[in-house]
Image: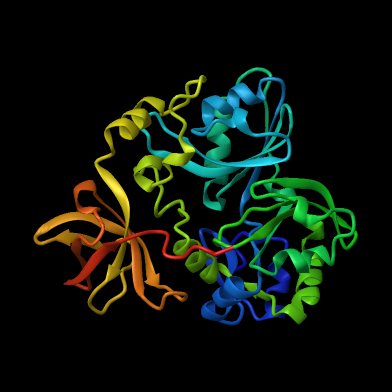
Amino acid sequence: MADLKQTPLYEVYKEYGGKTIDFGGWALPVQFSSIKEEHEAVRTRAGLFDVSHMGEIEVKGEGALGYLQKMMTNDVSKIKDGGAQYTAMCYDDGGTVDDLLVYKIKDNDYLLVVNAANIEKDYEWLKQHGTDGVEINNISEHMAQLALQGPLAEGVLQRLTDNHSLSDIGFFKFQTEVNINGRHALVSRTGYTGEDGFEIYCDANDAVGIWKDILQEGEQDGVLPCGLGARDTLRFEANLALYGQELSTSISPIEAGIGFAVKVNKETPFIGQEVLKQQKEEGASRKMAGIEMIDRGIPRHGYKVFSGEEEIGEVTTGTQSPTLKKNVGLALLKKEFTSLDTEVQVEIRGKKVNAKVVPTPFYKRTK
């Protein structure tokens, strides 16, 4: 693990029983107790994740808004101060550079949160299209990011926070300079689990202290440290796309099912707009669909999907859902095979196994 990138929390993983793996060149915990335990903790109580491998890029200057409008598929002009927006960056052919969050600190001052595996690629892409009056800075090394997710997240974090009422932070909103036991952080009501919760952006030097304080404070509530395994099963059940699986250079946001983040009629033209507009208006030839196994077997990423002898797509993510206790998956299929209850076959270890198309998300919180 010595040659892998490490987050500021790497040294404390062992203290909490973390089992570390190579995740895209990063040494990160796949689990601390078990994936199922951690998944259940987030769904019913709360769990704390180290997501400091994610990237942070500042975009500042008088030309920042116009520049971001050109680079992003969503309408950045709609973000108010203290607001966040989910969006994507695309190539001219509609393929996806990355999906990301844009935080508006104030006019001419934005923070982009990008996927860990794409930090350098995104930074180069942004700089390549840079214009006068725009300053672009990769500040990833100086920041850490923690995610406290689950129905008890607000109560636990509020007990450590004396200068802000967290209930005032609405969904996809944030506050800066939140005091967490003497350490300041940007706290947003966002996450990647399908549950209520917060993402905490702090100075890298403060990460260990905030991590330990939250777990100590949350012990009475059953808050668990959580790894990447539970993060993946949680986001998958909530039908939240993962770059490299549901999205890629060859999968557009429309095909991936995040067309809500593509505003093809905004005033400022953006990269990839023509292709994405055509896909939106005419329908893309491929579409992301939920599948549930009828016969035994678990659909895994990359498994081919058939209708009879015709290959119609492949699984992007699949597992046994810890919440539903069913073998389910997401699959990018030819659109004519994506109607609900359409029977398909997944090729598992050389054998075609029956499945059917089902609605997504597989899980949605009730409050």
Q: Nearest the camera: 344 or 68?
A: 344
Up/down of 161 relative to 298, above or below = above
- Residue at position x 39%, y 52% in the image: 246
Farthest top residue in view: 132
Q: Quadrant of the C terminus?
A: bottom right
Give x and y (percent) for residue 24. Answer: 51, 58
Q: Is residue 85 left or right of residue 133?
A: left
Residue furthest to the left in view is 309
Residue 103 % position (x, y): 67, 40
Taking 366 as reference, is 142 left or right? right
Instruction: Look at the image and tell me whether residue 202 can be seen.
Output: no
Out of 323 and 141, give the one closest to the viewer: 323
User: At which x and y percent is residue 190?
Assistant: 63, 53
Q: How many marks?
A: 0
In the orientation shown, which residue stands out farthest toward the front? 367
Could you tell me which residue is drawn at 59 percent across and 67 percent down?
Answer: 28
Quarter of the picture containing the N terminus is: bottom right
Residue 3 in percent (x, y) is at: 59, 63
Q: Nearer the viewer, residue 309 or 141?
A: 309
Q: Is residue 270 left or right of residue 113?
A: left
For the point 73% across and 40% down, the residue is 82
Specify the color scheme: rainbow
Is residue 3 something one can see in this rendering?
A: yes
